Amino acid sequence: MEAGRAARGAPETGDAVVDAALSELARLDGLELARHPALVDAVQTALAERLAETD
């Protein structure tokens, strides 16, 4: 597991796209999500696109 990811508390899934999205979301740990809509939207988009690829 990448040390930086583990330090931020983001889980490792083994999927590079999902891991990157979760790492970005972990940057907001302890912060109010409503104040960071662009980052939350980017994470949601990345995860939705990755999920669509698995169909």
Image (cartoon, rainbow, N blue to C red):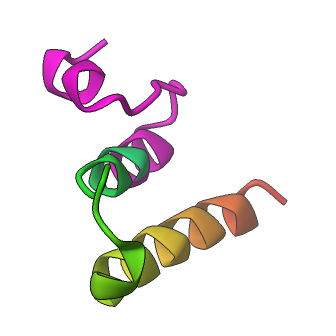
Residue drawn at (28%, 63%) of the image = 31
Residue 9 falls inside the magenta stretch: yes
Total marks drawn? 0
Rendered view: 31 above or below 48: above
Q: Which residue appears at 31% of the width and 49% of the height?
A: 29
Q: In the image, what residue occupies the spot 46% across and 24% down?
A: 12
**Which stretch is magenta?**
1-21
In the picture provided, is 51 more to the left or to the right than 42?
right
The residue sitting at 24% across, 32% down in the picture is 8
Q: Decide: is 22 above or below 14.
A: below
Choose top left, top right, bottom left or bottom right for residue 39.
Answer: bottom left
- Picture coordinates of residue 27 (x, y %)? 23, 52
Q: Is 7 left or right of 9, judged from the image as shown?
A: left
The percent coordinates of residue 7 (x first, y second) are 20, 22
Q: Quadrant of the N terminus?
A: top left
- Between 19 and 50, the one lying in front of the other is 19
Relative to 51, is 22 on the left or the right?
Answer: left
Q: Quadrant of the C terminus?
A: bottom right
Does 49 lie within the magenta span?
no
In the rendered image, the vertical position of residue 2 relative to residue 13, given as above or below: above
Position in image of residue 47 (x %, y %): 57, 63
Position in image of residue 6 (x %, y %): 28, 20
Figure quadrant of residue 13:
top right
Q: Residue furthest left?
A: 4
